[in-house]
Image (tube, rainbow, N blue to C red):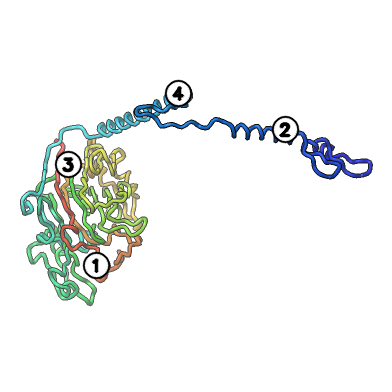
C-alpha cells in the first residue's frame, strides 16, 4: 500500500496519509469533520445559489407589428461563413446536375442513327375493320414450333378494331365448338377448309383430331397473329408500337421475322422487340406482366440458338405492362440495333455487330453426334458483313400466344404452372387445369386483349 493512502503507527494502527485529509479530518470524538476543500466547494455553491436567487428576471415582451426580432447569433462571422459555404455547395450541386443531364442528352442524341428515314407505315387503326392491304392473318393450329396451345384465326372474336384501337383477344375453343369437341371426336382440318396459311399444309400445322384415348385435344385457345409480310417490310430503319399488353395467366407477346429465309431457318434470324407474360407476379422472382424481354435469335441449327448472348430483360417497379399503354420500338442500322421503351434514347437491348454473330453466339464446331457446325454467314461479303443475318428485309408480327413448351414458361418458375414442357400432351394438361388459370382472364375481351393504339415503320432511305 502506498504512503499516500495511510501511515503505519508505532502501535500498529493505520494512520491515514496526508492525501486522505483533503477529504475529511477525524475528530477526537470520532465524528468526521469536513476538510478545507469541502468548505471551499460549499462556499462556492452558496454564492452561485445566492446569485441565481437575486438575478434579474428574464425580460419578456410582445413584438410590435412589423418589428423584426433580434437574432444576434446570426450576425456572427461563423454563421456568415457557414451560409456562404452552403450557398456555393448548393449551386455547385445544381450546376453539376445540369451539366450531367446535358451530357447524357448529348450522348444519347449523338448515338442516334444519322441519315434519312422514309415512313413506310403509319397505322392508326381508323375505321371499323382491319385493313387487309396491310395486315395478313396467319391461320394455323400447329403451335408455330413453340408448342403453343392456340389456334390462330381471322375471326372477329380474336381480332377487331374499335374506337381507333386494334384488339387481339384470346378466346376458348370450347366457346366456339363445345367442350366435347375440344377433347374428343372432332377433326379440325384447315387445309380442307381452304384457310390454312402454312407453307406445308399436310402436317399438324393445318390439321388435328381430338381423341380422348390418346389424350390429344384441339388447341384449347383461339387467338390471332397479324403480319405485314406481304405489305410492309424494312431493311434497316425504325419500328414504333404503342400498346397495352394482355391480362391473364399464361398469355404471352411485337416481333419481326425475315421476309425471305435467305440463310435458311433458323439461320436467318428473329428480332423480338417485346415479349411478355400476362401473369401477375405471385412471389419475389416471379416472371409476370411486370417484365419484358427483348432478344435476337440466331444460330446454325435449331438446337443452337445464340439468343442468350443477345437478350435484355426489363422489369417495371410497382407497375405492370397491362395497366396502361407503353411505347416500344426498334432502331436498326448497318452497325448495330437496339430496342427501346418510351423514346429511342431509353435503350433496352443494344447489340453491336462488331464481332459478328457467329463469334457472339460462341457456337461449338460440332454437335454431340459429331456433325460439324459451319458458320452460315461466313460467305457474306462487304463492309457490313458482320450484320448478317440481320442484313435482310424483315416484317412485323403482332400476336397473343398462349402457353407453349419451348421453355419460355419454364417448369422451374414456381408459379403453379399447370403443365410440363416435357409432357406429350401438354395442351391437355393445360386445359384440364383451366379452373386454376381461367379466373385470371378478365371477362371483358378488351381487358384480356393486347390493345394496340398505333404502329409505325420507317425504312432507311
Q: Which residue is identified by label 1?
A: 427
Mark number displayed over residue 235: 3
Q: Nearer the viewer, mark 1 or mark 2?
A: 2
Choose the circle earlier in sequence order: 4 or 3: 4
Mark with earlier residue (3, 1): 3
Query: Mark 1 or 2 closer to N-term?
Result: 2
> Could you tell which of marks 4 and 1 lies nearer the N-terminus?
4
Residue 40 badge: 2
Q: Residues within 10 Å of mark 1 (few under 14, many from 20)?
A: many
Please give the label number shown on residue 75. Answer: 4
Residue 131 coordinates in the image, percent (x, y): 7, 51
415 and 212: which is toward the camera: 415
Residue 229 position (above or below residue 173) = above
Task: Residue 187: give x, y in percent of width and height.
Answer: 13, 71
Q: Bin the neighbour count of mark 3 within 10 Å (Cα to Cα): few under 14, some 14-19, many 20 and up.
A: some
- Element at label 3: loop
Quadrant placement of the C terminus = top left
Q: Nearer the viewer, residue 256 or 79?
A: 79
- Helix, strand, or loop for circle 2? helix
2 or 3: tag closer to the N-terminus: 2
Amino acid at each position: 500500500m502506498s504512503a499516500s493512502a495511510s501511515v503505519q503507527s508505532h502501535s500498529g494502527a493505520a494512520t491515514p496519509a496526508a492525501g486522505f485529509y483533503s477529504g475529511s479530518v477525524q475528530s477526537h470524538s470520532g465524528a468526521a469533520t469536513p476538510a478545507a476543500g469541502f468548505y471551499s466547494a460549499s462556499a462556492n455553491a452558496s454564492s452561485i445559489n445566492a446569485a441565481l436567487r437575486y438575478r434579474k428576471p428574464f425580460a419578456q415582451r410582445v413584438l410590435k407589428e412589423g418589428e423584426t426580432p433580434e437574432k444576434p447569433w446570426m450576425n456572427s462571422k461563423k454563421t456568415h461563413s457557414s451560409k456562404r459555404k452552403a450557398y456555393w455547395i448548393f449551386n455547385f450541386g445544381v450546376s453539376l446536375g445540369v451539366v450531367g443531364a446535358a451530357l447524357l442528352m448529348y450522348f444519347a442524341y449523338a448515338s442516334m442513327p444519322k441519315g434519312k428515314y422514309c415512313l413506310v407505315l403509319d397505322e392508326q387503326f381508323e375505321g371499323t375493320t382491319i385493313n387487309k392491304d396491310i395486315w395478313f392473318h396467319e391461320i394455323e393450329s400447329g403451335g408455330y414450333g413453340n408448342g403453343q396451345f392456340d389456334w390462330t384465326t381471322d375471326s372477329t372474336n380474336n381480332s377487331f378494331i374499335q374506337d381507333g384501337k386494334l384488339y387481339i383477344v384470346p378466346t376458348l375453343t370450347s366457346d366456339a365448338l363445345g367442350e366435347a369437341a375440344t377433347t374428343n371426336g372432332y377433326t379440325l382440318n384447315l387445309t380442307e377448309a381452304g384457310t390454312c396459311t402454312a407453307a406445308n399444309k399436310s402436317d399438324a400445322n393445318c390439321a388435328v383430331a381430338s381423341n380422348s384415348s390418346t389424350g390429344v385435344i384441339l388447341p384449347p385457345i383461339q387467338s390471332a397473329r397479324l403480319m405485314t409480310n406481304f405489305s410492309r417490310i424494312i431493311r434497316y430503319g425504325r419500328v414504333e408500337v404503342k400498346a397495352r399488353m394482355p391480362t391473364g395467366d399464361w398469355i404471352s407477346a411485337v416481333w419481326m421475322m425475315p421476309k425471305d429465309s435467305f440463310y435458311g431457318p433458323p439461320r436467318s434470324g428473329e428480332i423480338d422487340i417485346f415479349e411478355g407474360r400476362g401473369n401477375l407476379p405471385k412471389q419475389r422472382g416471379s416472371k409476370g406482366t411486370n417484365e419484358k424481354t427483348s432478344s435476337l435469335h440466331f444460330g446454325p441449327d435449331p438446337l443452337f440458338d445464340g439468343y442468350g448472348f443477345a437478350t435484355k430483360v426489363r422489369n417495371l417497379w410497382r407497375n405492370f405492362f397491362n395497366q396502361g399503354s407503353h411505347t416500344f420500338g426498334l432502331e436498326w442500322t448497318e452497325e448495330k440495333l437496339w430496342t427501346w421503351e418510351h423514346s429511342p434514347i431509353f435503350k433496352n437491348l443494344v447489340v453491336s455487330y462488331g464481332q459478328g454473330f457467329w463469334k457472339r453466339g460462341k457456337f461449338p464446331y460440332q454437335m454431340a453426334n459429331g456433325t460439324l457446325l459451319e458458320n452460315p454467314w461466313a460467305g457474306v461479303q462487304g463492309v457490313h458483313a458482320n450484320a448478317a443475318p440481320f442484313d435482310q428485309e424483315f416484317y412485323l408480327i403482332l400476336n397473343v400466344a398462349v402457353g407453349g413448351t419451348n421453355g419460355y414458361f419454364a417448369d422451374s418458375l414456381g408459379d403453379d404452372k399447370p403443365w410440363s414442357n416435357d409432357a406429350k400432351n401438354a395442351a391437355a394438361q393445360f386445359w384440364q387445369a383451366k379452373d386454376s388459370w381461367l379466373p385470371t382472364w378478365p371477362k371483358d375481351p378488351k381487358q384480356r386483349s393486347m390493345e394496340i393504339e398505333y404502329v409505325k415503320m420507317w425504312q432507311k432511305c
